Amino acid sequence: MNAVVSVCLLACALGIIVYLLSRRETNRRSQYGPAGLSEFRTGLALDECFDRLDTRSDSDLFAYECRRENDGSFMLHLTLHQPSQQPLDTLYTLRLDPGRQTVVTLIFIREAFGYKEPLFPPAMLDEFMLQKLDAHRTK
């Protein structure tokens, strides 16, 4: 009987730990700033944003891939190639909302090496968004 109670208490403790860790991760991702959600605004129309994201040039700050997922969202994969170092990779969910100004929302997913925080400084992301979409950070 003691073994059954011990197993039940252990299962409950593990369930609580998993719940708390997943809740902490959800809270971290919903925060504004480099660790969670970043919002930008641009005067470009939605179609022009898509056209600019499809157009790549040698002067782009990052090598990147922007692809549509099955659920209709977009995955933005940014890569920074550094001489004599391993490239830095970051994944974001990209959302474009039309309006008087197009709202560009980036939600950090993960670094390629499993880091829970992006390795790119926010200023680099700001520069990329300004360069590609003429977008300025609002949050």
Image (spheres, rainbow, N blue to C red):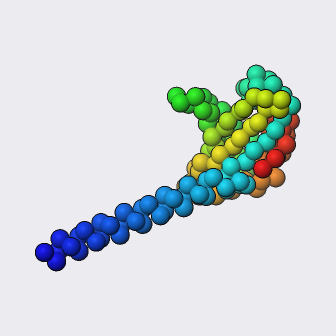
Left or right? Give the position of 71 relative to 42.
left
Q: In the image, residue 50 lies at what x, y percent?
A: 73, 26
Q: What's the residue at 62%, 44% (across, down)?
A: 91
Residue 119 location (% of width, % of height): 68, 56
Could you tell me if residue 20 is visible in this image? yes
Q: Nearer the viewer, residue 130 or 17?
A: 17
In the figure, 89 relative to 76: above or below?
A: below
Left or right side of 103 for 110: left
Q: Which of 114 and 28 is in front in this view?
A: 28
Quadrant for the N terminus in the image? bottom left
Write down the quadrant of residue 51 in the picture.
Answer: top right
Q: Is residue 83 visible?
A: no
In which quadrant of the rendered view does residue 73 lie?
top right
Apparent side of residue 116 relative to residue 46 in the rendered image (left or right): left
Q: Indicate the quadrant where residue 32 lies.
A: bottom right
Kindly give the residue lying farthest to the left in the view shown: 1
Q: Is residue 136 above or below residue 2?
A: above
Image coords of residue 97 (percent x, y): 72, 32
For the point 75% across and 28% down, the residue is: 98
Residue 48 is left or right of residue 109, and the answer is right
At horizontal 36% and vertical 63% (from top left) the residue drawn is 15
Q: Residue at x 58, y 28 (%)?
A: 72
Answer above or below: position of 45 versus 135: above
